[in-house]
Amino acid sequence: MPCPWPSGLNGRVIFRLQRPSLLPAALAWLGCLALGHAAETVDLAKAELLARQHCIGCHLFPEPELLDKKTWTEQVMPRMAIRLGLSPESVNQHPEADALWKSGRFTRVPLITKPDYFAILEYYKAKAPEEALSQKPVAPIGLALKQFTSRPSRFRRTVGAVNMVSIDEARRQVYHSDGLGKFLDVIDANGNWVESLQVGNVPVAFAENAGDFFLTMIGTFTPSDIPRGELALLRRENGAFVRKKTVLPSIPRPTHTNFADLNADGRTDLIVSMYGNNIGRLSWFEKQADGSYTEHILLPRSGTLSTAVYDFNGDGHPDIAALVAQEVEAMHLFLNDGNGVFTPRIVFQGHPLFGHSSFEMTDFDGDKRPDFVVTTGDNGEYPSPPKPYHGIRVYLNRGGMTFEESLFLPLNGAFRALARDYDEDGDTDIAAVSYFPDYAKSPRESFVYFENKNGSFTANTFRTCISGRWLTMDAGDVDGDGDIDLALGNYMYGPDKAIFVPDFLMQTWERSGPPVMLLLNTLRSEPAKR
């Protein structure tokens, strides 16, 4: 199945804004096909076998009840027709047709017969519910978030275009992006402007390594298979950022960069998540003695959101965990033999509608082993209601590279979750932002603080939680008082915004939405007077 646009971004957000669609020709073809087969009786048992045969090539089997009948027949299956080679004219009409054909992800030779395709279509049409699945109860979200003081940034360059936030604890600053103007902006703990650097691309991740600053830039939020992304090296000179050089040019929509010496040669290598669109990959770049990099592909598929580095098998070598949100939607481990040769394995996997949007690795239960906190909430692919399987999941490390889902917190549109002991009571709380909340029924889902009380969680938010559309988030002590603060980034532009966002909210964000909302922890200080 074509997988959600992701999200995420540590802030993955790979929007389908103004996407040149592959659907019109496919829909026209599908209509003709349906007319030609309307009178035929389909054996649904055989059709299910066909569906299972053709739908598990790159992901888990999607059960019909995961989506409503209309979404299956009008959205998903026409896209499948294209992937299966039944509508090559749709690819030909795409402005990036040459790149798509060269990628090998599309074929001119049908992979299925038309009768078999029609049978699968009828199977999903017959078995899917008329209406969307009912939602699991979302915890009542109160307005009793007294531990944090909200402080909107005072600097506002453009209307909500922040697709990256990063807290620098040492400097007590927040770095954030302006995706429209292609700036890296810096504010202090009071939300005041410090400096800006025009970088000429769209920043999505910021990282410091050994005194160097690396800026990952996606190239374009609009899905594209033309590689316009890049990794740039920044340095500070005379107290300000300057762009020194492009480390990796022309890469396919990168979303995250990590660092490790993967082959024990004493040089720091790069691990770059190149989400791409139809064409993407996960690679590590071996640093050479002359400072150049040699690419080694770990996963030749699109959809990697971000990575974490850890010695998972205890052999003394750094391994790589990568969350992939397209095709095989799963947490992938790449086990390192010490020489930069990796063995892949999957430790947990979701069905292709999960909508993985972010993850972080943390010791959630205090047993000295790294666990995974994962969000599933990307709802940008199809114009459909919120999903009952969207929310926050915690996978506990049971040893032997075995991870078990131990916690699920329902949250419509969950996009990022950061697990910390924010109240310093000895257990792990969770702060989360939602990019696709249910604005009609529960707009407070846009930011939720889940306070852990002996294993049960209470949910609260701040009173002005809908003053922005929060896409990204970072945690750290930005004001220097010793407790953990939060920074939320406002990105108001998104897919199908007319469906998901009421007009009055869009107008509010355009008029007064802050680029960044600081949530300053008052655990060790008095709440700010405003």
Image (tube, rainbow, N blue to C red):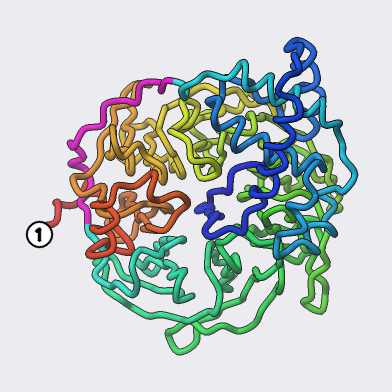
Q: From this viewpoint, is residue 209 visible?
A: no
Quick check: 423 left or right of 48? left
Location of residue 100 in the rendering, given as x and y in whole percent from the top left corner: 78, 57
Quick check: 474 left or right of 354? left
Picture quadrant of residue 135:
top left
Q: Which residues are magenta?
A: 134-150
Q: Quick one: 159 or 292, which is closer to the camera?
A: 159
Quarter of the figure with the N terminus: top right
Q: Residues within 10 Å of mark 1 (few under 14, many from 20)?
A: few
Picture quadrant of residue 165:
bottom left
Quarter of the figure with the C terminus: bottom left
Identify the residue under disc 1: 530
Report if residue 143 lies within the magenta region: yes
Q: From this viewpoint, is residue 170 visible?
A: yes
Report if residue 14 lies within the magenta region: no
Residue at 61% from the left image edge and 49% from the top image edge: 305
Quick check: 368 left or right of 433? right
